[in-house]
Amino acid sequence: MAELLTVTRTQVAQTAGTKAPAASFNRMRVAVIETPAAYAAPAQNDTAGTSIVLPQGSRLLLPVTVSCAAGTASSTLSVGLRDPKTKVAIDATAVVNAAAINAASTSQVNTGTKTINGQTYLLPQDCELYLTFGGAAGSANQAIRVEVPFVAP
């Protein structure tokens, strides 16, 4: 069977002696987002910053795990990327796209627009992870935990 040449390292790159980028071969890290013990009920489309900034060149990995206590009917959670200084959204659903948080559960949610269907995504700049509550108004004090694996450069 012939060897499969990957998109990451072509035969030309191998011959030239270039190495795989750090975000392709490095330690996996996990950004952990947890809601505080006490907070007001979020309205639909409210956002919450996490102050967790992934460095430029990081590669998002799967699976993303979302754990939560029971919330309100139809409530969802999205995890996106935004500029850490200006707070302008880069992609509001890059990591998780509208995961149901109405029932208590722990699940792997691989629906982000930058990671679904076998895509790979390297962050073009430093990016803060942030949350958007959707579907319906959320529950006050609902325990939510999101684990986002990534490889940093």
Image: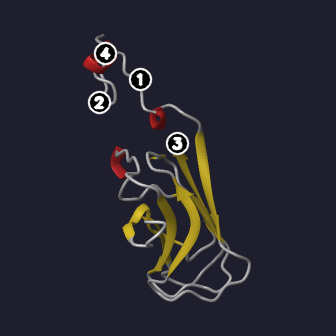
Mark 4, secondary structure of its residue: helix
Element class at badge 1: loop
Q: Residue at x 48, y 34 (%)?
A: 22
Marked residue nearer the N-terminal end (2 or 1) = 2
Q: What is the x, y in percent for residue 130? A: 51, 69
Question: Circle 3 sits on which residue?
Answer: 151
Q: Name the residue under label 1.
A: 19
- Marks 2/1: CA distance? 13 Å
In terms of depth relative to the viewer, which is nearer, 132 or 89?
89
Question: Label 4: which residue?
Answer: 16
Which residue occupies the extreme front position in the image?
85
Q: Label 2: which residue? A: 7
User: Which of the two marks, 4 or 2, is nearer to us in this view?
Assistant: 4
Mark 2 crowdedness (10 Å alpha carbons): few <14, some 14-19, many ≥20: few
Residue 135 in percent (x, y) is at 44, 81
User: Where residue 104 appears, x then y in whole percent?
Assistant: 63, 71
Sequence-earlier tag: 4 or 3: 4
Nearest to the eye among marks 4 and 3: give it: 4
Q: Is residue 5 left or right of residue 69?
A: left
Query: Image height check: is 31 above or below 28?
Result: below
Relative depth, front residue between 148 and 85: 85
Circle 3 sits in a helix, a strand or a loop, which is it?
Answer: strand
Residue at 40% of width from left, 66% of height from top? 93
Q: Is residue 75 left or right of residue 105?
A: left
Q: What residue type is labelled 2?
A: Val
Q: Are marks 4 and 2 in contact (CB under 8 Å)?
A: no
- Dot 3 crowding, Cα within 10 Å, few <14, some 14–19, many 20+: many
Q: How far apart are marks 1 and 4 (CA)?
A: 9 Å
